Amino acid sequence: MNWLSSYVRPKIRALVGQSRPDLPENLWDQCASCERMIFHRDLEANGRVCPHCGYHMRVGPEFRFRALFDEGSWQRVEAPRVAADPLKFRDLKRYSDRLKEAQNRTKAFDALEAAAGTVDGLPTVIAVMNFDFMTGTMGTALGEAFITAARHAVETRSAFLVVTASGGARMQEGALSLMQMARTTIAVQEIKEAGLPYIVLLTDPTTGGVTASFAMLGDIHLAEPAAMIGFAGPRVIEQTIREKLPNGFQRAEYLKEHGIVDLVVPRHEMRATLARLLGLLLRPKLESPPAAEVTSGPEVATEDEMANVDAGQ
Amino acid sequence: MSSLLDFEKPIAELEGKVKELRHLADSSDSGLDEDIAKLETRAAKMLAQTYAKLTPWQKAQVARHPDRPHFKDYAAALVPDFQPLAGDRSFADDAAIQAGLGRFRGRSILLIGHERGSDTEERVRHNFGMARPEGYRKAIRLMRLAERFGLPVVTLVDTMGAHPGIDAEERGQAEAIARSIECCLDLAVPVVSIIVGEGGSGGAIALAVADRVLMLEHSIYSVISPEGCAAILWRSAEKAADAAEALRFTAQDLREYRLIDEIIPEPVGGAHRARDVTIDAVGDAIERHLADLEGVPGLDLRLLRREKFLAMGRPAAA
């Protein structure tokens, strides 16, 4: 869909012609928050943060790996394949079809992808949830991928960062998805018992059983600005209490005010913040004076790097 | 029977007829005894048949039956000297979760569970068994206390879920649940959990990560309520019965998927028809499992508990 088909009235569109082959796709994006149009390349160059209002759009695992790891330092940690659709679940659609559709679209096995590399030279495993894959819900495959990533961190003596984005538990796996709350918590315990840092970066949105398990057990909780983070969904709460919710309710800044997250960090400062925190935790004594702060990352990247990000998205 | 479930109506009608005939038989010498006996047998048979093949949606209704034994009934019958303890030491005492020490068949234990309340006033006071963060934090505090003195922890799970509200979110509902799960996994004392009614989502598993997880025959344990699931996936809460089928949340389903260790049989016609029998059966199961876990070193318990949960959903070792 391009700006013509999205935002130009049908009559005018007919005049211009429906699909001109010389018009590249995705020329413009619209900010979901301020609704202003953003030139696609500007948006990518700004780390998918709206240049007008600062709204942080959702990004996937590939983007995070490129944004957070030292360039060229990382490779994927493969997640084990688990039996799909253990319940043979079917609502209006078969779960197995929903899964296949999500797998084809994202080219991933499930909603959590992990990679191992370095952040400012420090070995780190980063696991990223993909909201685009069945709203990032947690089922057996995701639990298994989380455990595998955490254990890889333990084996390689790496810090473990998880970037959350999830609608909660995956109902299509019934109580098996509920059990992932306990299983992922065991993985967190293994990281902590190994004396490694466990950092959670909460992004929009993080809710339900994911929030109520590994997402709230971090040594340090970072959050992106305005990210919606909570246990119960706002609609459920509104229906239960029959009251309007306060302004900014369940947003990152609100959670910080209530003592639930440590830092609200804009995306373009994330890598530097992470590097600083990991450095403080893992390099307690410096041999030589510190080098300049790490600031590089695709948010301020060259066009070449941006082209790579495009390809990955 | 104070609360009759829809599918129990035919049984109740038969039982009503039996009562009427008895009344007649008492007032006149009509030789109705044989008819009464026949009807009684039929009613009993119908009850047994109905309860032998409850649909998942019917199970949900039985699991939530208001006359089912609740935490306070179990505590009173199984732990006669039950000493409730209160508060999370930082904010409040949450009446949705009850916890305390007491002697269960000779053993000093920590008993924790959700309390839904039995009449309107109680239900409001206990918030229908839907806990706030301070409830889970009280549980954590007392589990740590039990651990220090080597006392086993027994939890009774019966909740629609954790309380969804502004206050709960502000005080870190998600964090409190996560910490409770973490605490359960960490304890170096035996932990036995029984889903006695409704095991609703995160609010339930927060107290159900145990060495032994048992379910009463007609209890349910689900990631989401059938109504909630239907509203999201079928876009209509009316489809709750369909969602109930799909979610596979009955005790029998969970046993099949090897997510629980044992099913405790209920009396014919459900726990609400014979509360004392049910409570005794639960007590016997707790006693058996505690005896079994006794003497296992704390660190082994912790390790085995973790292995048990890690094995869930993985193909069985050949």
Image (cartoon, coloured by chain):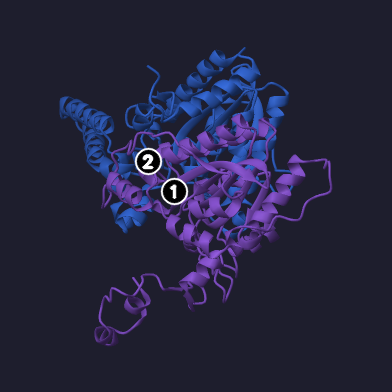
Image check: B229 left or right of A54? left
Residue A57 in the image: state x and y as whole percent: 51, 64
Residue A199 in the image: state x and y as whole percent: 64, 45
Q: Which chain is purple?
A: A
Residue B33 visible at all: yes
The image shows residue B251, relative to residue A71, as above or below, that is above
Secondary element at tag 2 = helix
Residue B145 in the image: state x and y as whole percent: 71, 30
Q: Quadrant of the C terminus of chain B?
A: top left
Tell me the residue at 52%/29% (across/down).
B193
Q: Earlier in the sequence, mark 1 or mark 2?
A: 1
Image check: B225 left or right of A52? left
**Quadrant of res A227:** bottom right
Q: Amino acid at mark 2?
A: Glu
Tell me the residue at 51%/69% (across/down).
A43
Residue A298 in the image: state x and y as whole percent: 57, 59
Q: Are marks 1 and 2 in contact (CB under 8 Å)?
A: no
Reading the image, the residue beneath label 2 is: A173
Q: Nearer the viewer, residue B280 or A154?
A: A154
Reading the image, the residue beneath label 1 is: A137
Count neighbours of disc 2 (C-alpha within 10 A) and say few if under 14, some if 14 to 19, many if 20 or more: many
Tell me the residue at 25%/78% (across/down).
A18
Q: Amino acid at mark 1?
A: Thr
Spatial separation of the CA atoms under disc 1 and disc 2:
10 Å
Count neighbours of disc 1 (C-alpha within 10 A) and say few if under 14, some if 14 to 19, many if 20 or more: many
Chain B, hue in figure: blue
Image check: B252 left or right of B35? right
The chain ID associated with circle 1 is A
